[in-house]
Image (tube, rainbow, N blue to C red):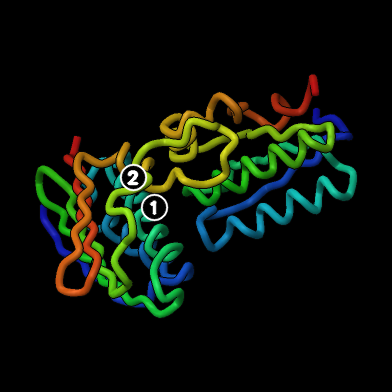
């Protein structure tokens, strides 16, 4: 069973809950989708989106579009935002060495649960592509 | 039975960028009031992200600096997975129940 989903809005913390709600709907629509696949994909989506909320410039003025496709063999999503170019490409994709460090784990966590995480700057927008193969 | 010197905090729902700052402040206020042995009961939490982990680490450091500790109990699957993937299960081990987490401080 396949399906497509789209969510557009402002890249602000409150919008993260709309993404959670959308992913919950994906689970209801696709009972064949394994719970752990969806859970790990949701973890990645929220980290990547949270990264845009935290670092997007100008703060509070960035809009985004989230497009998710459920395919028989994978989950694939693209988050495109209107913010300025992300400074470090995929900077931050390695887990911090100090376990007591409070931040810097977001993209590392997303990288750990995805089969692919790509960043692309194109047409004055940032594009994050996330892919997880279904178990 | 829970030790009377233990304070149990019970966040619910999603601990993401929206909710994490409030959890961090709650732990700081609890420690500031002199209650430094804290168990965070995650039984009603459905999701945590890296900002939520940051709030727990901040709380752990705050509690330890005051001579106490912070422990996790009733940790759901998604939180366990995230703790493992970030290697934080070493500093924030998961206890099955609040009672298990509440002795031998």
> Would you place residue A81 above or below residue A89 in this image?
below
Q: Quadrant of residue B96?
A: top right
Q: Which residue is mark 2?
A: A110
Residue B3: image location, x then y, percent: 85, 30
In this picture, residue B28 sits left or right of residue B12: right
> Would you place residue B96 above or below residue A27 in this image?
above
Q: Are marks 2 and 1 in contact (CB under 8 Å)?
A: yes
Q: Can residue B103 be seen in the rendering of this structure?
A: yes
Q: Judge the density around disc 2: few (<14), some (14-19), many (≥20) Cα neighbours within 10 Å.
A: many
Residue at the top extreme, as displayed: B104
Q: Judge the density around disc 1: few (<14), some (14-19), many (≥20) Cα neighbours within 10 Å.
A: many
Give SS at disc 2: helix
At a point 42% along the width and 70% down the height, the residue shown is A15
In this picture, residue B57 sits left or right of residue A109: right
At a point 16% along the width and 54% down the height, the residue shown is A70
Q: Quadrant of residue A115?
A: top left
Task: Name the subunit of mark 2.
Answer: A
């Amino acid at each position: 069973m396949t399906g497509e989903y789209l969510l557009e809005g402002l890249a602000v913390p409150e919008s993260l809950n709309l993404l959670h709600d959308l992913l919950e709907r994906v689970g209801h629509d696709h009972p064949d989708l394994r719970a752990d696949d969806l859970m790990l994909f949701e973890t990645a989506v929220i980290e990547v989106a949270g990264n845009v909320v935290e670092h997007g410039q100008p703060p509070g003025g960035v809009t985004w579009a989230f497009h998710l496709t459920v395919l028989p063999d994978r989950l694939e999503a693209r988050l495109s935002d209107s913010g300025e170019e992300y400074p470090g490409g995929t900077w931050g994709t390695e887990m911090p060495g100090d376990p007591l460090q409070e931040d810097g784990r977001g993209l590392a966590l997303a990288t750990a649960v995805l089969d692919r995480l790509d960043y692309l700057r194109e047409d004055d927008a940032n594009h994050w592509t996330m892919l997880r193969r279904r178990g | 039975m829970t030790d009377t010197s233990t304070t149990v905090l019970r966040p619910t729902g999603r601990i993401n960028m929206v909710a994490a700052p409030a959890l961090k402040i709650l732990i700081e206020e609890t420690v500031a009031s002199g209650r430094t042995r804290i168990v965070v009961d995650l039984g009603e939490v459905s999701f945590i992200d890296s900002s939520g982990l940051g709030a727990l680490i901040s709380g752990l450091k705050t509690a330890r600096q005051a001579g106490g500790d912070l422990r996790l109990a009733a940790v759901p699957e998604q939180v366990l997975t995230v703790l493992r993937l970030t290697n934080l299960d070493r500093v924030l081990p998961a206890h099955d129940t609040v009672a298990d987490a509440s002795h031998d401080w």
